Structure formats: structure tokens, C-alpha cells
Image: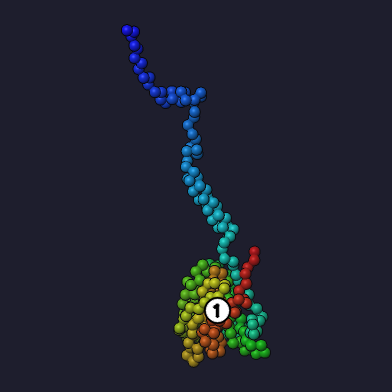
Amino acid sequence: MADIETEQPSEKPSGLQAIWANTLEPTAPLPWYRRVPRKAWIAGAVVVSLFTALTVATVTGAGAPPAHRIVLADRIGDQERMPDDGVVAAERGRLQKNLTALSRYREVSVAGYGSAGSDRSTLLVVGMTGSFPDAREELDRQFGAVWGADVSSETGESLKGRQDYPAGPLGGALDCAGLAGPTESRTICIWADGTTVGGVIDGKGDIRPEDLAQRTLEIRAAVEVEVHD
């Protein structure tokens, strides 16, 4: 009986031997960017796009609300601008003290308005242009320091009954309050947004706060104009 040779199974090649066994030439390892999952590439692209958009917006101001300034017209509705009197001159001087190099204010405008044909102002309109990131915080400052402490110390008036009212299509915030003096009372409404602060004071003292708030919206729409570069 012929000897039967028992074949031993050969060992499987590994490492470079396996590469040579399966291909004619050795295959190089995949570069790192081929090993990154597709989802990771997509996520990275989104992050880069967002960062680029934010950078452009920061540099160019894209997406920011438009800047405005106050321009007091010769006529607002049925009210005409009156020649400056002592009240207007005193108020302008008081507010212009705040126009310092480090102040948030850059411009101050003050004028008195009255009915056509009259020689007496019945409304005092005040406008300030500058930078006011928080409208509500600026209103608190106006009612607390600018009109609360400053005016009270000079005229003896005190603020009372401050209320919040709709600010209208220009946004920001609008509050009205009473200015109670020793002998008479007036009403004041103040608005604030990103670049303007304005106030309207009833000089006669016979306009209800809600009515002056509505009139303030009309005045604001007439005097707050967009700044074009």
C-alpha cells in the first residue's frame, strides 16, 4: 500500500504577506481625510459656514437693526415749531452737559411745538442720538436720573405713576409718567431704542398719559429718521 502523504495546512499570510497575496502591488494605508466619517465632514462644514457668517455680520453690521437719529421738523402734524423760549433753552443746556467724549449721547435736539397761529409752546420735544443697547435699561436711567433726580432738583417736580405703553412699529420701549410739581402737574412720555432716546412733555398739563403716549408715537414717527451710510 502506497504511502499517503499527509498535507499539512499552510499558515495564512499576514501583514505585508497578505497584501502581496491579494494584490499585485502593496496598497498604501488610506489617508486621514479618507478615514473621517462623512457625517463629521458635514458637521465641520456647517460650523465653518456659521463662523464665516458671524464674522461677516460682525465686520459689516449685516443683520443689525438700522441706525436712526432725531431730526426735529418745522411741523409735526398740526403742531408747528415755535421760536425757542426760556424753557427750551434751559432744557437744551441741561442735556448738552451730557455730550462728553465718553458719553453714550452724540446729539441733542430740543424744540417747543404749538398749534398753528399760536405763539406759545404746548409740547416740549426732546431727542437724543447715540448708542443704547438695552432700551428698557435706558428708560430706567432716563426716569431715574435724567428726569427723576435732575429735574426734581431744579424744579421741585417728582415722577409718579410710570406706566409702560406699546412702542409702535419702530420698536424699543415707551413709558409715560406724571411730573407733579408744587402748583401744577405735567405728563412726560419717553421712548428708547438702539440709537435714539426721545421725550415728549405736555406743557399745559391737560393731556392724559394714554393720550400723550399715542401722540408720542406720531411725533416719534415724524422725527426719528433712518441713517444711510
Residue in front for this viewpoint, 120 or 163? 163
Q: Amino acid at mark 1?
A: Gly
Q: Quadrant of residue 100?
A: bottom right
Tell me the element at label 1.
strand
Residue at 51% x, 47% y: name it.
Answer: 42
Q: Is residue 116 above or below residue 223?
A: below
Quarter of the image containing the C terminus?
bottom right
Residue at 62% x, 84% y: name it.
Answer: 113
Looking at this rendering, what residue extends furthest in the front direction? Answer: 1
Residue at 54% x, 90% y: name it.
Answer: 206
Q: Is residue 160 above or below residue 167?
A: below
Point out residue 173 in the picture as x, y percentages from the top left corner.
Answer: 51, 74
Circle 1 Cα neighbour tier, 10 Å, few/some/many (<14 / 14–19 / ≥20)? many
Point out residue 168 in the picture as x, y percentages from the top left corner.
Answer: 55, 75
Looking at this rendering, what residue extends furthest in the left direction? Answer: 1
Residue in front for this viewpoint, 134 or 112? 134
Residue 49 appears in the rendering: yes
Q: Which residue is mark 1?
A: 199
Looking at this rendering, what residue extends furthest in the bottom direction? Answer: 183
Point out residue 224 in the picture as x, y percentages from the top left corner.
Answer: 60, 74
